[in-house]
Image: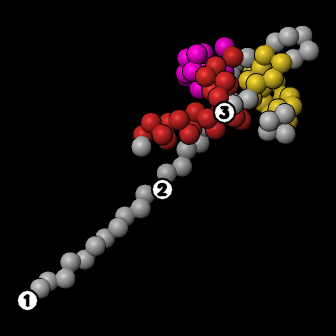
Amino acid sequence: MWRRRKRTEITVETEETVILRSPGNVTKGWCPECAANVSLTTLESATAIVNVRADQVRQGIASGHVHSTETPDGRWLVCLSSLLRWTTENKADAQS
């Protein structure tokens, strides 16, 4: 006599909320890649906000995952929307 085994599948969903608090180095501006007004900040502030090294953010910019734009006075600003999306994706990939 064969016994039938029951299979139970459990799915766990998680959600993450990111709260940004930064010194006054965040400004609103146009991101051409996002085609939207977004929060922009300097590379130095961006690294502090997401707690990654500057070279990692530069790699994200070079790969096109993190957007950046140059101001008329020659400063480079990082799009926080793309930066947060990129760091969230990288954390998910690292946990996989």
Question: Which residue is nearer to you in this view: 60 or 39?
Answer: 60
Residue placed under numbered mark 1 in the picture: 1
Identity of the residue drawn at 77% across and 20% down? 77
Q: Tell me if residue 15 comes above or below residue 5 in the rendering.
A: above
Q: Secondary structure at mark 1?
A: loop
Magenta stretch?
Answer: 44-56
Identity of the residue drawn at 56% across and 39% down? 89
Question: Which residue is nearer to you in this view: 64 or 25?
Answer: 64
First in sequence, mark 1 or 2: give its number: 1
Q: Tell me if residue 65 comes above or below residue 6 in the rendering.
A: above
First in sequence, mark 1 or 3: give its number: 1
| Rendered image quadrant of residue 6 | bottom left
**In the displayed structure, does residue 32 sit left or right of residue 66?**
right
**CA gap, disc 1 and disc 3:** 58 Å
Q: Tell me if residue 65 comes above or below residue 12 in the rendering.
A: above
Density class for disc 2 (Cα within 10 Å; few <14, some 14-19, many ≥20) is: few
Residue placed under numbered mark 3 in the picture: 65
Q: Secondary structure at mark 2?
A: loop
Q: Main secondary structure of the magenta part?
A: helix
Residue placed under numbered mark 2 in the picture: 13
Say which amino acid is labelled 3: His
- Residue 76 place in picture, x, y as percent: 78, 16
